[in-house]
Image (tube, rainbow, N blue to C red):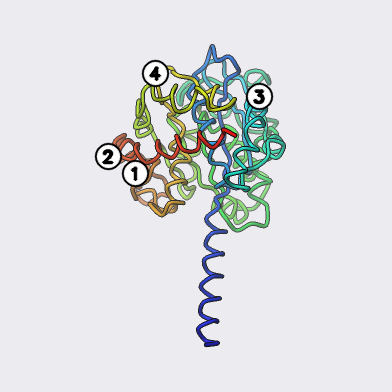
Amino acid sequence: MNKIKLVFTICILLLVNQSLFARFRVIISSDFPPFPVTNSDPDDVQSMVRFLLYTNEFDVEGLIASAGTFEMVAEKKNILAVLDIYDEVDENLRKRDAKYPTADYLRSVTYEGLGNNHNIEIKWGCDKQAWTEIIGEGKDSEASNAIIAAVDKPDSRPIYICVWGGPREVAQAIWKVQNTRSKTELNHFISKLRVFLIACQDATHEWLIGNFPDLFVIESRKTYHGMFGVDDRSWVETNIINNHGALGAIYPPKAIAGEGVIEGDSPSFLYLISANRGINDPEDPTQPSWGGQYKRVDSTNHYIDGVGASTISRWSKDFQAEFKERADWMLP
């Protein structure tokens, strides 16, 4: 009997440990627009609403405001404005799961990158300027410093950085470590990063890919298009926007790419949500996942589009059903 109890106890401890390690450390870097969205793309707002409804599953290490389309400014006040709205529904969410973070906690880990509003001229796209114009000496930001601080924590878990705009802040963090620490320390730093890039949005993208073959990078060049139109405007208005609290109400019914669900940035964290469902191993992007399926580039640690957009859209019934359910959680 004692042996049976011992085996049972060990099994319980293993399950507890697995559940602890299933909580991924996540940083979101978004070219987040102001309200109301005018000279920018509203799809980041769509993705942020969905992400906030899943924060109970993550250890959120940072929300970064980066420079992005079209004015290329970085202003964390735009993210903070959304967190004020999240603050109106988070108590209802915690009735479902006490692990939902408070708005105050999320505010405390919201950081600002550099953009044209900081006298750093950043141009949208990979080939519009030299990377030396936007990263290097004197170009640290509170966001790039926060990335370094998060990686330096005595926590063996990797950090997944979901990059919805340009990766300037990630690149600046790596540049600083490269230029202030030993090669061994740089390699250790890089080994803890998992970077998911949506498209190619500034000059530092190619610098990262070209100089750090061991850096774990997923490049969703076009696979993210699998999010476009997974549900139409009518579905969004019924299940997310109308009668679902203040946070649902700010979900834009359309974006530059069309009406309804666009969310081109959401694959970066849907990839981890499906891992939490046991669908994929996040260390192997060649496996099917809600965030797409990718192929390895030669002997590097880089992954690019494989089959393409259908590797996301095939899962739409599953992740949309969960989205609908969680939107209901915002209600009293």
Q: Secondary structure at mark 2?
A: loop
Q: Picture coordinates of residue 12 (x, y %)?
A: 54, 70
Q: Picture coordinates of residue 294 (x, y %)?
A: 34, 44
Q: Which residue is mark 4?
A: 259
Q: Picture coordinates of residue 286 (x, y %)?
A: 34, 49
Q: Secondary structure at mark 1?
A: loop
Q: Earlier in the sequence, mark 3 or mark 4?
A: 3
Q: Residue 307: which disc?
A: 2
Relative to 271, is 37 above or below? above
Q: CA distance from mark 3 to mark 4?
A: 24 Å
Q: Earlier in the sequence, mark 1 or mark 3?
A: 3
Residue 139 horizontal side relative to residue 194, left or right? right
Going 34% across and 50% down the picture, which residue do you hit?
A: 287
Q: Which residue is mark 3?
A: 81
Residue 68 horizontal side relative to residue 322, left or right? right
Q: CA distance from mark 1 to mark 2?
A: 7 Å
Q: Residue 216: which disc?
A: none
Q: Is residue 153 visible?
A: yes
Task: Say whether marks 3 and 4 touch (CB < 8 Å).
Answer: no
Residue 311 horizontal side relative to residue 45, left or right? left
Q: Earlier in the sequence, mark 4 or mark 1?
A: 4
Q: Residue 293: which disc?
A: 1
Q: CA distance from mark 3 to mark 2?
A: 38 Å
| Residue 89 picture quarter | top right
Q: Amino acid at mark 2?
A: Val
Q: Secondary structure at mark 3?
A: helix
Instruction: Give the farthest residue toward the top.
Output: 38
Quadrant holding the C terminus: top right
Q: Earlier in the sequence, mark 1 or mark 2?
A: 1
Task: Say whether marks 1 and 2 touch (CB < 8 Å).
Answer: yes
Q: Secondary structure at mark 4?
A: strand
Question: Closer to us: mark 4 or mark 1?
Answer: 4
